[in-house]
Image: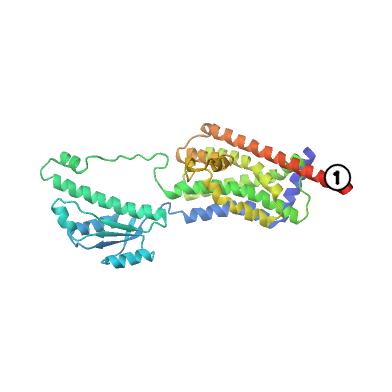
Amino acid sequence: MIRALWSGLRTEVRLILRTPPVLVLLLALPLLYPTLISWLYQANDSVDRPVIVVDEDHSNASRALTLAIDATAGARLERHGATLDEALEALRDQRVEAVALIPSGFGGDLARGERTAVRIWSDSANMLSYGVGVGAIGDAVQAEGRRHGLAEWARSLPAERAGARAEPIRVDTRIVNAPARAYGDFIVPAVFVVILQQLVMLGMAFSAGARREQQIEAPKGIGGWLGFAVPHLGLQAVGVVGLTFVIGYFGWPLRSPAAWLALTAAFVVSVLPFGVLAATFTADRASAISTLLFLSVPSLFLTGYVWPRDQMPTLVAAVGDLMPSTPALRGLRLVAFEGRPAAELVPVFVELGQIALVGVALVALRLAWLRWRRSRVAASQAA
């Protein structure tokens, strides 16, 4: 086995060094891809969404509300003095993402202590923009409503009681784990984990495809495939260090670098058997890229990180349980948002180890089947 391991390692190192596309895939992409993602999401959250406020009242109250909407972080007035038809046309043409209508009589209704309404239209095609823009308008309207209610009650009541009447129930929301509530902080580290998983598998499958294209003999047995995997483990270690640098440079949440490195090391090791398994099926480099890139987005959704697991079909959730990225992303929440030390990631490490053992078992079954098929072919040729 030692001889097969050494032979597989030596052959794979030579192949990587004399095949530039493999070297670029294994070294450059782990740095370039996260850097590109970080650059795209460096704003971290969606702010200043373009909106139009149609003011049909032209009162002091309507002008105050318009200024309040423009002052929020989530909305930016794109145009003043537009009619409702012009505003809705801009919404249909996607020049703005929301339209708010302040109706005629708005200020008079408030002055008389009567209820009035602000109507909002929104383009919900982009859920992030929809949530930010409409939320900003709604927050501004509610704040103005509280201010007018407080002023009305303050005419006859002390300030404290007037505040209680104007806002009898207050909401005191405490956000844990991700206090910034920023989209980038939430999604980008998870994308990095999935990128790491896909690059480990893609790198090994891509290299195996190059090996077959050059008619180099496949590794022999468990020892040969283990030797095949060792150079990839070393290169992925370099990629993890580079990824850690990118995370720190762009300021993504990472409270415990030591715990992050321990988590990613365990994660990469757990992915290696599945990379070997993918390599045994790969016919050429094109098939490796087309297959594994196709699985990139589903692999993120299957983890339960961006979509609740209890909303998935049972079979789909079971497939997600077999993916190393599923426990890795649970560990990521602890490391990135809660700053847990590596010692508290032991359950995650245990689960990654169990998944790795499943991968090793699948590789052993695959290699046994390949040996059986070769023996059948040899027997038929001898006959």
Snapshot colouring: rainbow
247 to the left or right of 292:
left
Q: How many marks?
A: 1
Percent of width and height locating residue 373: 78, 45
Percent of width and height locating residue 199: 61, 49
134 to the left or right of 26:
left
Percent of width and height locating residue 176: 40, 39
Q: Residue furthest right?
A: 383
Percent of width and height locating residue 123: 37, 59
Can residue 16 be seen in the rendering of this structure? no
Secondary structure under badge 1? helix
1 to the left or right of 191:
right
Q: Is 107 in front, or is 239?
A: 107
Can residue 35 be seen in the rendering of this structure? yes
Which residue in the protein does label 1 denote? 379
264 to the left or right of 144:
right
Residue type, label 1:
Ala
Q: Residue furthest left?
A: 156
Which residue is located at x 37 percent, y 52 percent? 131
Query: If the image is split into quadrants, where does the N terminus sit?
Result: top right
